[in-house]
Amino acid sequence: MATPEQNLATSRRWLLEVFNERQLNTVPEIIADDYRNFGTTGATGVEGGRQVITQADGWAPDRRISIKYQAAQDDVVLLLFSVEGTHTGEFMGVPPSGKRFQVWFADAFRFNEEGKMVEGWVIGKGDAMLAMKALHDE
């Protein structure tokens, strides 16, 4: 069984290696076949994990994630992090502004016994949409 510390390390890889560095070849090492993402895509499994990344590439290909806080207990990891980049593509119906942004997200990840992510909960996507809309008002 994976330890909370191992799950935390895998979560950091997900955000820093896969999201920031686009190491899509790493996705099968991190995401379980029965993975479900809540809040970003309806797809499941490894392909669902890849879709999370390609969606983000569509609205902010230069994005960078910085982790502020992290905690792990049993099979769950919680992370608070910022995403900054340039809003160059549509995000949740908001047309691109071409402007720089920074938004905060909290994600909760649950892991199976092998240490692969089986759930990804995105918290703050609505706040990000409001931030993207506000870019148009500046």
Image: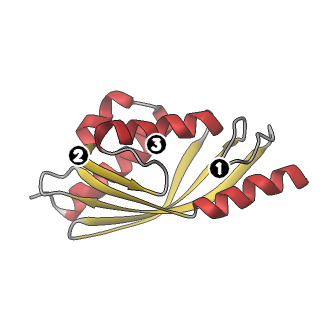
Query: Residue 84 appears at what percent x and percent y?
Result: 65, 47
Q: Earlier in the sequence, mark 1 or mark 2?
A: 2
**Residue 17 placement: quadrant:** top left
Q: Residue furthest right?
A: 138
| Residue named by callout 3 | 52
State left or right for residue 73 relative to residue 16.
Answer: left
Which one is in front, 105 or 72? 105
Which one is in front, 80 or 117? 117
Q: Residue furthest bottom?
A: 73
Q: Residue furthest left?
A: 1
Give the mark count: 3
State left or right for residue 129 relative to residue 30.
Answer: right
For mark 3, does the 10 Å Cα neighbourhood hold few (<14), some (14 to 19), or many (20 or more) residues? some
Residue 32 is labelled as 2
Residue 60 seen anywhere in this rendered image of the structure: no
Alpha carbon of mark 1 to alpha carbon of mark 2: how far? 26 Å
For mark 1, does the 10 Å Cα neighbourhood hold few (<14), some (14 to 19), or many (20 or more) residues? some
Question: Is the Cβ of the residue at disc 3 closer than 8 Å to that at disc 2?
Answer: no
Amino acid at pointer 3 = Val
| Residue named by callout 1 | 92
Alpha carbon of mark 3 to alpha carbon of mark 1: how far? 13 Å
Query: Residue 81 appears at what percent x and percent y?
Result: 53, 58
